[in-house]
Amino acid sequence: MTFNYSKLRGRIREVFGTQDRFAEAMGRSDTSISQKLNNKSEWTQQEINRAVEVLGIDDVDVAAYFFAQKV
């Protein structure tokens, strides 16, 4: 299954300015985050929880950011 992370990418830019700064806040490499945003590896529950925290995403909006399917 492929997910659409465009909303998540926008939030990353809005909050951190760059994907690299977001990766740093997540404690992950830029490569690791890039792979996740490009559907080459999956997000773990811990990573989703951390991303929600650092990006200030409301719990009710998690699905829109992490589980929107690509059409």
Image (spheres, rainbow, N blue to C red):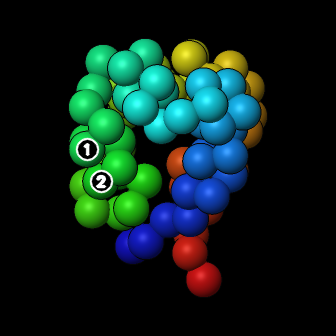
Q: Measured from the top left, where is residue 14 in percent x and y? A: 72, 33
Vertical placement of residue 53 versus 31, above or below: above
Callout 1, which amino acid?
Thr
Name the foreground residue: 56 vs 45: 56
Q: Measured from the top left, where is residue 70 in percent x and y? A: 56, 75
> Residue 14 has which mark?
none
Name the secondary structure under disc 1: helix
> Residue 35 has which mark?
2
Vertical placement of residue 17 versus 9, above or below: above
Classed neighbour count for the residue bearing mark 1: other residues with Cα under 10 Å, few (<14), some (14–19), many (≥20): few
Left or right of residue 26, residue 71 in this image: right
Residue placed at 56% from the left, 56% from the top?
5
* Residue 38 quadrant: bottom left
Name the secondary structure under disc 2: helix
The image quadrant where one finds the C terminus is bottom right
Residue on which the image places disc 1: 31
Q: Measured from the top left, where is residue 49 in percent x and y? A: 47, 24
